[in-house]
Amino acid sequence: MNCKISSILLSYHFLTLWPEIMIKGINAAAGKNGKITHYWLEINDVVVDITGDQYNLIDDRELNENIIQSR
């Protein structure tokens, strides 16, 4: 949940500075029964993930291959 709050707060500041930009909030789930969730932003097809480093602390067995390759 902290990744979503952090991303929403960042999007607020981006929109305050640049109100014309389009920001997409993306939510995804992985792991057993989708118990590992994550939220990040996409701005003009660029991923802005200020909390993505948290996945370096999770055992590889709990993550899908796409997350591991994107570390």
Image: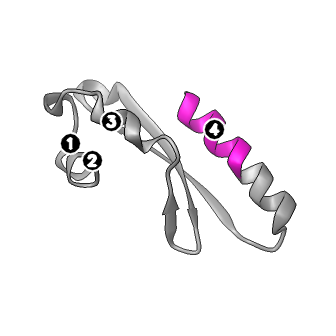
- Label 3 sits on a secondary structure element that is helix
- Label 4 sits on a secondary structure element that is helix
> Label 2 neighbourhood size at 10 Å, few (<14), some (14-19), many (20+)?
few
Nearer to us: label 3 or label 2:
3
Residue at which label 3 appears: 55
What mark, if any, has residue 67 been given in the picture?
2
In magenta, the rendered stretch is 1-10
- Label 2 sits on a secondary structure element that is helix
Residue at which label 4 appears: 6
Inter-mark Cα distance, 1 to 4: 23 Å
Q: Give the amino acid at mark 1.
A: Asn
Q: Give the amino acid at mark 2.
A: Ile
Point out the tag, 1 or 3, that comes first from the N-terminus: 3
Q: Is residue 59 left or right of residue 26?
A: left
Q: Position of residue 31 (x, y in %)?
A: 25, 31
Q: Nearer the viewer, residue 7 or 30?
A: 7
Q: Is residue 9 left or right of residue 4?
A: right
Q: Is residue 45 left or right of residue 28?
A: right
Q: Nearer the viewer, residue 56 or 65?
A: 56
